């Protein structure tokens, strides 16, 4: 053949996946369970009349069907393997055999195509077996599938059907039940890597190990996709430097570098790929990290890639990679309806690299896991970027006097507990008459006549910051949380105040009457005034109260009383409240005034329910000593007359 000067003869080039397509059972990559079953069936003459091959693309379904057709018609078959040299094998390899008929069900999915196939199936062929391969059989229409059913169940004796599909769930159950179903799986990465190196050696392709790892990862378990990626890498002389690799983006997620993540996305998008395609590739890479982190199967990864993914998973952590998968999955859903698909993708990356901006439950779980890891390792938590340091004045206040105007950190504890709860409410006026006002005047006069309790050095130092006294000359007490925090710790060297073993009941009772009781808040003073100290044990003072109801009410504010006792004696003191009937008896020389009874004439000047609570707190010591009420309505009619004075019953 002659050529003009300067011209190059056209040489037909065949793709690697077609050139190295397996032609024998022993050339198949993976799928050993299918190869073994079919080879044994051919050798023993027990092949079925219909087979269904299902599995991902590029895993060898159609190639296996062609090898089966050659084995069934080979004149020199040996141990179930076709020879590949006889006339029938050569004709099948050259796509010129009358014994093999391939039909694409995606383009021939009508009922007329199935009727034509059924009519030709009864005709004879040169070989022993006539093989029909229906690719993508799930694309057949319902009418075409029903037309194939009868022939598929009882075909002519010389016909074998092989149905191939990537979605077996869409195949009619009646068709699946009439065929032997073989499932093809993804090929492990180690087998694909060995296959790539064999092809490279035979085709004289020179690539480094990094390119081989990239080709295997790109194939993702598919032999055809792997050889197509090898073809592309061979044409480029290596891998694309700024194309498929997402290492920079993954590294940005691990190091939580928002700027690097956005720059990596912009660099990848400049190559012409769609944002959704990049997000899907990143999701697939993170899925490998997730599987390796939780101990899942990663057979599709080569050994070198598996070591790199393990390192990323160790630095990423299970909580972070799980949250990344969820965030990217949600972003992919939002990208379908977003005017600019880049926005949901970039927002997801910002949230992943800056958990402080994400208020989702997954982000909070990740932050808690990181704090637990820091505590377990003994490290200190990092100050978030942009967080302001505490002011020196605030630090001084936190370490000094706690009786300030700042709100209490506990939302259920008031900022200041005054001598009267009604006075603490803005705009509330003190009642000038009624039982509550009388009880308040008696209590204020008794408090003014009591001796001043001893003040410790710490309390004196913080005196300038204390709130000013009220009109009665009393200062509001601190809240319960501050009282507990201000209790001085016990001396560890034994040089402090004497322990409980050195205190007697008389000393504790004397301190109690000498100032400790009067330093309590009005509520605590009213409840604890009716009790007495019974005994003093190792580190606990036993306090007796008249009955169980009174004891339960005192138990509600026991921490406040323990804090005041600890501040007075200079060490923590615990209280144990017990029932002591003798505690309710009035002491010689006076006792609490009796609770005044009310009549119906006092309704106009009755205090509010909140004031009634104060009144009960001040004067009730024993529920059995309360007088019977005289103004209780006995019926609904009596209560109506009482509620509307001057009204008369007409009927």
Image: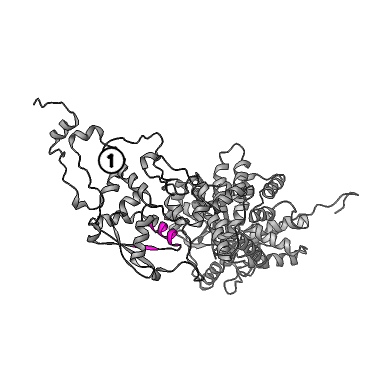
Left or right: 69, with 599 as reference point? right
Q: Position of residue 215 (x, y in %)?
A: 69, 59
Residue 55 visible in the displayed image: no
| Residue designated by label 1 | 438
Residue depicted at 49% across the width and 71% down the height: 494
Q: Eyeballing the image, is 135 above or below 628?
A: below
Q: Which quadrant is the N terminus positioned in?
A: bottom right
Colouring of the image: one colour
Quadrant of residue 72 in the image?
A: bottom right
Left or right: 262, with 56 as reference point? right
Instruction: Give the residue furthest to the bottom.
Output: 79
Left or right: 445, with 200 as reference point? left
Q: Secondary structure at mark 1?
A: helix
Q: Position of residue 297 (x, y in %)?
A: 55, 65
Front-lying residue, 497 or 250: 497
* Magenta stretch in the rendered image: 561-576
Quadrant of residue 557 in the image?
A: bottom left
Residue depicted at 57% across the width and 45% down the height: 331
């Amino acid at each position: 053949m002659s050529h003009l000067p300067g011209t190059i003869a056209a040489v037909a080039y065949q793709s690697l996946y077609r050139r190295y397509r397996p032609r024998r059972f022993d050339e198949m990559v993976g799928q050993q369970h299918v190869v073994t079953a079919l080879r044994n069936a051919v050798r023993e003459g027990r092949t079925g009349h219909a087979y269904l091959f299902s599995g991902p693309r590029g895993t060898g379904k159609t190639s296996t069907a062609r090898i089966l057709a050659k084995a069934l018609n080979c004149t020199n078959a040996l141990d179930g393997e076709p020879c590949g040299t006889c006339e029938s094998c050569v004709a099948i390899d050259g796509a010129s055999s009358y014994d093999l008929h391939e039909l694409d069900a995606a383009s021939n999915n009508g009922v007329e195509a199935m009727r034509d196939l059924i009519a030709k199936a009864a005709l004879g062929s040169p070989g022993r077996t006539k093989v029909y391969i229906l690719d993508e059989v799930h694309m057949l229409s319902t009418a075409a599938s029903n037309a194939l059913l009868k022939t598929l169940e009882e075909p002519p004796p010389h016909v074998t059907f092989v149905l191939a599909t990537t979605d077996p769930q869409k195949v009619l159950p009646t068709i699946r039940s009439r065929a032997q179903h073989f499932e093809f799986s993804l090929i492990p990465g180690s087998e694909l890597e060995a296959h790539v190196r064999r092809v490279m050696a035979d085709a004289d392709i020179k690539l480094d190990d990094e390119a081989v790892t990239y080709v295997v990862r790109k194939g993702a378990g598919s032999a055809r996709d792997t050889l197509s990626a090898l073809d592309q890498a061979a044409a480029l002389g290596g891998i694309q430097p700024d194309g498929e690799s997402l290492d920079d983006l993954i590294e940005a997620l691990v190091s939580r570098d928002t700027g690097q993540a956005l720059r990596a996305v912009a660099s990848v998008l400049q190559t012409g790929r769609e944002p959704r395609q990049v997000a899907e590739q990143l999701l697939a890479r993170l899925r490998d990290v997730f599987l390796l982190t939780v101990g899942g199967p990663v057979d599709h990864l080569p050994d070198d890639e598996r070591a790199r993914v393990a390192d990323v998973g160790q630095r990423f952590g299970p909580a972070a990679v799980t949250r990344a998968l969820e965030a990217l999955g949600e972003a992919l859903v939002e990208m379908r309806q977003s005017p600019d698909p880049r926005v949901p993708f970039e927002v997801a990356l910002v949230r992943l690299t800056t958990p402080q901006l994400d208020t989702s439950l997954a982000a909070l779980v990740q932050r808690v896991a990181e704090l637990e890891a820091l505590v377990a390792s003994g490290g200190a938590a990092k100050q978030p970027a942009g967080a302001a340091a505490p002011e020196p004045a605030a630090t001084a206040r936190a370490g000094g006097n706690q009786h300030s105007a700042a709100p209490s950190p506990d939302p259920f504890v008031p900022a200041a507990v005054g001598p009267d709860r009604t006075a603490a409410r803005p705009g509330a006026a003190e009642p000038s008459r009624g039982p509550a006002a009388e009880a308040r005047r008696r209590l204020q006069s008794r408090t003014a006549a009591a001796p001043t309790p001893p003040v410790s050095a710490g309390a004196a130092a913080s005196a300038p910051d204390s709130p000013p006294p009220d009109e009665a000359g009393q200062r509001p007490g601190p809240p319960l949380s501050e009282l507990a925090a201000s209790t001085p710790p016990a001396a560890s060297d034994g040089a402090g105040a004497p322990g409980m073993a050195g205190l007697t009941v008389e000393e504790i009772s004397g301190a109690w009457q000498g100032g400790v009781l009067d330093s309590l808040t009005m509520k605590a003073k009213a409840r604890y005034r009716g009790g007495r100290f019974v005994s003093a044990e190792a580190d606990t003072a036993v306090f007796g109260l008249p009955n169980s109801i009174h004891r339960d009410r005192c138990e509600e504010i026991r921490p406040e009383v323990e804090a005041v006792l600890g501040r007075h004696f200079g060490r923590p003191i615990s209280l144990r409240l017990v029932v002591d009937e003798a505690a309710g008896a009035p002491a010689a020389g006076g006792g609490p005034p009796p609770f005044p009874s009310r009549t119906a004439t006092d309704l106009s000047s009755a205090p509010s329910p909140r004031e009634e609570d104060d009144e009960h707190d001040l004067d009730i010591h024993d529920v059995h000593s309360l007088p019977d009420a005289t103004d209780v309505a006995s019926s609904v009619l009596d209560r109506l007359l009482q509620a509307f004075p001057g009204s008369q019953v007409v009927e």
